[in-house]
Image (cartoon, grey):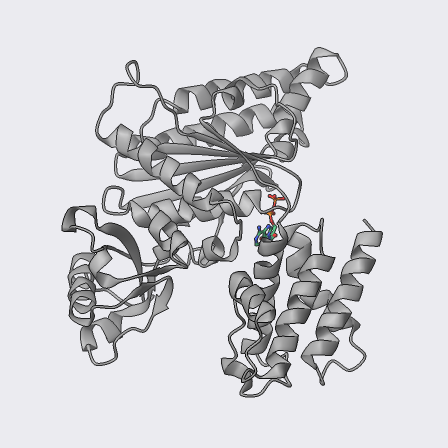
Amino acid sequence: QHSLPEDKVLVPVEVTLKPSSTAKIEDVRSAVEGMLEKRSLSYIDGPIPVPLDEAFLADNVQRICVCGCDTDEGRHNDNVLLFWQVKPIVHVFQLSEEGPCEDISSDGQSSSFNEWILPAKEFDGMWESLIYDSGLKQRLLRYAASALLFTEKGVDPFLVSWNRIILLHGPPGTGKTSLCKALAQKLAIRFNSRYPQSQLIEVNAHSLFSKWFSESGKLVAKLFQKIQEMVEEESNLVFVLIDEVESLAAARKAALSGSEPSDSIRVVNALLTQMDKLKSSPNVIILTTSNITAAIDIAFVDRADIKAYVGPPTLQARYEILRSCLQELIRTGILTNLQDCKNVMLPNYACAKERLNAPDLQEDSTFMQLCKHLLDTAEACEGMSGRSLRKLPFLAHAALSNPFDCNHIKFLCTMVETAKRERSEL
Ligand code: ADP
């Protein structure tokens, strides 16, 4: 059945401008909207070609990407949405190429925080590269979007309470820090008409305490002074990422038991007070991560509205991570021996399972073998973190006896062996 216009699915379309482009965002947005309307695309998730016959777009636009899988409908329909179901929401942006601006303290030592202007080139593609199969990313995106909307509409926090603190916790290497950065980048893009500027301040809580405590106090003061200044500018959207937040609790505990100088408790308290103050500003989102899964005894974390557990990847997620790795090795020509090599598209988990259960006799058997081996490898990697999985193809390549004849079957076998070795060394 056709949906009525009012229940069309809003699908974000992200348009990246070329670094050299000086076109007005507004102009590019209407050109893209016109183009989408004219072409009645089916909204599959992923990039669509920039039309070469439209000079204005071809000159200014680097990439157009449909984010259909950020919607429930997209996820339930294998990321395929049809144009009559959809209203595209076009977001145009240019990536900042400035890189991290590391604050150097007066004594020339590098300090404990980094500042990024968003959307940053370094975080481009990070959101897409993170794979979780529980809808975690969509949940985080929607949560943050609601929080920003409530603020913008001026909902009275005494009547409806919400906050802008997110805590991601779970074992190391599961992508928590990356997910925070990627989320900040996404929100900076999706909210750029309301907030034309956006920054991310990255604080490593642990490093605050590995310094002299007297220095730490000054650092915290300086850091928050800076953040406060940013937040006062109404058109700024500010993200504060505090990594390894459990070290704050640990430092406080140690100070209370007398095993650390009482200076440290002052630093922790200063940090918590400052964060409490920040919470009242509408244009701040605080992102925190912790490698400890048990409860963290810190007041502000208690108040986090979203506490999401980020676990090791499931079989399906492992398959998808390894698939994206292999696809990259095929694209770059490192993995050879496949017919029509560079255009081979490895199937996603569901398709691979289906095709292996009901093999089509027409199908190239080399290709089927590849799917089978990939699934086996994903099974063999149980318990490995996302971080280890992304390193595995490199380690396997380095372990090949003849790296210039990189046959895919040999390669996947080496990968299983490497995985076993890695796991035994854990
Ligand atoms: P954490 O903060 O949990 O220790 P990181 O954010 O430092 O983890 O993750 C390190 C790297 O591991 C990421 O940059 C990413 O390449 C990879 N990674 C981890 N988990 C995943 C995942 N679920 N999907 C894809 N890549 C992942």
Q: Give the total number of marks visible in the rendering.
A: 0
State whether residue 292 appears in this view.
Answer: yes
Give the quarter of the image for residue 280.
Answer: top left
Q: Is residue 261 visible?
A: no
Q: Is residue 241 left or right of residue 17?
A: right
Q: Residue, x 72% and y 18% (percent of image)?
A: 254
User: Residue 323 sits in which quadrant?
Assistant: bottom right
Image quadrant where one finds the N terminus: bottom left
Q: Nearer the viewer, residue 97 or 11?
A: 11
Left or right: 211 in relation to 114? right
In the image, residue 196 sits, relative to residue 229, either above or below, namely below
In front: 266, or 382?
A: 382
Residue at 70% x, 11% y: name it.
256
Residue 144 x, y percent position in the rendering? 37, 36
**Residue at x 57%, y 23% (from the top left corner):** 217
Q: Which residue is the extreme one toward the bottom?
A: 339
Residue in the foreground of this view, choosing between 107 and 391: 391
Figure check: 302 above or below 127 = above
Residue 252 spot, x, y in % from top left: 65, 18
Along the horizontal axis of the image, is 350 left or right of 95?
right
Q: Position of residue 395 (x, y in %)?
A: 73, 66
Give percent across and percent down for residue 134.
Answer: 51, 45
